[in-house]
Image: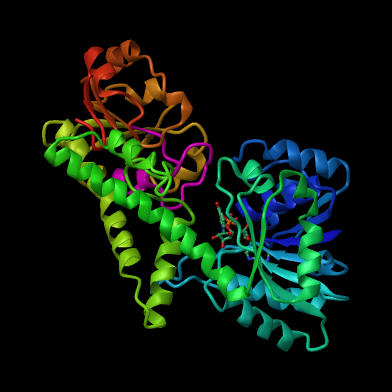
Amino acid sequence: MRLAVIGSGYVGLVSGACFADFGHDVVCVDKDEAKIAALRRGEIPIFEPGLDAIVAANAKQGRLSFTTDLASAVRGAEGVFIAVGTPSRRGDGHADLSYVYAAAREAAAALDGFAVIVTKSTVPVGTGDEVERIMREANPGADFEVVSNPEFLREGSAINDFKRPDRIVVGTTDARARALITEIYRPLSLNKPPLFFVDRRTSELIKYAANAFLATKITFINEIADLCEKVGGNVQDVARGIGMDNRIGGKFLHAGPGYGGSCFPKDTLALVKTGQDADAPLRIVETVVLVNDQRKRAMSKKVLAACGGSVRGKTVGLLGLAFKPNTDDMREAPSLALALALADAGAKLRVYDPEAMAQAKAHLPDAAFCRDAYDCASGAEALVIVTEWDMFRALDFRRLGEVMAAKTLVDLRNVYSAEDVRRRGFAYFGVGVA
Ligand SMILES: NC(=O)c1ccc[n+]([C@@H]2O[C@H](COP(=O)([O-])OP(=O)(O)OC[C@H]3O[C@@H](n4cnc5c(N)ncnc54)[C@H](O)[C@@H]3O)[C@@H](O)[C@H]2O)c1
């Protein structure tokens, strides 16, 4: 089948590459000329494990190509996927849909023959109706169906998530659209992903409800961690103890510095706004947003306490800057709020991340960017694990002890056992563990 994917970022590029890998003929579009030029040279603009190999193989076999010319990609396509960004709108926190609407308008003009317009971007309920209205206005004679197909992939394991999803949610009640979507995803049938067909509005809501629920789980265990610190108790064991209950499940119950990334912060906020506009306020999600916002900066207090109450003039090393391991994505990363708070308190920052250094530099102009974990720890009164990259899971404590000004580890991801670290002569501060 011929497919066009509009927007070649984390979602568009992964989707396009995987669809091509299924055997479809895919053109990925982006208005960012530098991004398209890089992709044509075989360079992947983002860090996502395994993506380079899939892009290279499919580009070589002629099933995957890149262009800035949206019209040429859409002409003759049976499926047009919209995967552009939907960031928080400046000023009010609603999802900014201007990129989605611009892509829809431009695509409408180029349509010839029946096509499904598939919204993969995360969009508020009712957006499909507006996309349809815009497209009918732009090209009254066009034959198309607007379908919602939210994406659930996670950065860092995006290829596997896309190829082996728990479910594929499709919002349409149109028989032709249903048949086309089934055909597009047919190559996945070996992996038996349930195609879950619902109406378009329900599909749009499923994506937000899923993200808000996961964000709530994280925030819940973070507050339990705070309680553990006050009253005694180990949050990791609490999480395990409740997670063994199938009704609860053990995932997304890792206490830490608060959720970040390109999705949860903006999606929880957008859902809150939708609820308020619809006179159905989502009080739980409102609280989650508030608690999480405060938490990221509050993590600096842990570092201050570990440094004897003040960091003024002291060097602090931050290990891991990306919002989670295996990505270079810095959007809403907890490291940013923490770094700013520590700088406000007078700390000198040394930082290191295996993949996100280039992205982080613009955000942290005053920090010293280091070669590796040991360079980052050099002269530090405290070393803080902010993002749990695998390479930080087996640090050489003897080496750290030799270069640090004080042997103090603040482990915001509970990577290490307190007992182990203390046995090596370090002071240890975790989250929700004594
Ligand atoms: N990143 C994730 O893990 C993830 C997961 C699930 C869903 N989503 C959702 O998918 C959508 C895309 O997210 P992302 O992280 O891939 O964003 P991104 O910022 O990485 O990529 C978006 C791309 O769209 C391009 N673009 C914008 N307007 C365009 C237009 N009119 N024509 C062509 N290209 C255009 C931009 O230049 C950019 O390269 C968002 O709605 C997001 O919420 C993201």
212 above or below 347?
A: below
Which of the 4 quarters of the picture holds residue 235? top left
Q: Looking at this view, name the residue that lies furthest to the front.
A: 246
**Is 320 covered by the magenta stretch?**
yes
Residue drawn at (73%, 86%) of the image: 136
Q: Main secondary structure of the magenta part?
A: loop
**Residue 320 point in image, percent of width and height:** 41, 35
Residues drawn in magenta: 318-340
Give the quadrant of the N terminus.
bottom right
Is residue 9 among what the camera can see?
no
342 above or below 10?
A: above
266 above or below 414?
A: below
Give the quadrant of the C terminus.
top left
Is residue 377 among what the camera can see?
yes
**Residue 205 point in image, percent of width and height:** 52, 69
Residue 30 lies left or right of residue 61; in this view the side is left
**Is 277 covered by the magenta stretch?**
no
Ligand 1 location (quadrant): bottom right
